[in-house]
Amino acid sequence: MDRKSIAASLDRYDLTEFQKRILIKLLDVPRGKVVTYKDLARMAGRPNAYRAVGTAMRKNPLPIVIPCHRVVRSDGDIGDYSNGGRARKIRLLKSEHALR
């Protein structure tokens, strides 16, 4: 799926424009890298909206295509993962060599 078709598919879901923008921005985070909720908010032009970024991650309708497992907390904790829990998030990050 390319970026344009992913963006178009998000229109089928009950997402705000900000949530769609956040999810599309997340496609810029390469495999093997992580970004914080706050970093992702900055990337989307709303640096103080990091809690709203968390909401967007929870509502992600395409969790593997749009890799919300790559978003971690600023304190270094990996945070939660609505698509299978923390254990699955850890496995995904390890498989991408983003965690040891």
Image (spheres, rainbow, N blue to C red):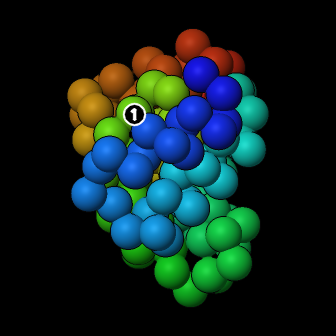
Question: In the shown orientation, is residue 30 left or right of residue 25?
Answer: right
Q: Quadrant of the C terminus?
A: top right
Q: Residue drawn at (32%, 45%), measured in percent from left and top?
A: 12
Give the number of marks.
Answer: 1
Residue 100 can be seen, yes or no: no
**Where is residue 22 drawn, in percent x and y?**
55, 60
Residue at the bottom extreme of this rendering: 48
Q: Residue drawn at (32%, 26%), measured in percent from left and top?
A: 87
Q: Secondary structure at mark 1?
A: loop
**Quadrant of the image occupied by residue 56:** bottom left
Q: Residue drawn at (45%, 26%), measured in percent from left and top?
A: 64
**Where is residue 96 drawn, in percent x and y?**
64, 19
Question: In the shown orientation, is residue 8 left or right of residue 25?
Answer: left
Question: In the shown orientation, is residue 73 left or right of residue 43?
Answer: left
Return the residue nearer the eye: 76 or 55.
55
**Quadrant of the image occupied by residue 30:** top right
Residue 65 can be seen, yes or no: yes
State the residue position of label 1: 62
**Where is residue 98 drawn, in percent x and y?**
66, 29
Q: Residue drawn at (60%, 50%), measured in percent from left and top?
A: 24
Vertical position of residue 16 compared to residue 84: above or below: below
Return the residue nearer the eye: 7 or 67.
7
Q: Quadrant of the N terminus?
A: top right
Vertical position of residue 4 compared to residue 35: above or below: above
**What's the amino acid at mark 1?**
Leu
Return the residue nearer the eye: 20 or 71.
20
Question: In the shown orientation, is residue 13 left or right of residue 94?
Answer: left
How many neighbours does mark 1 have within 10 angstroms: few (below 14), some (14-19), or many (20 or more)? some
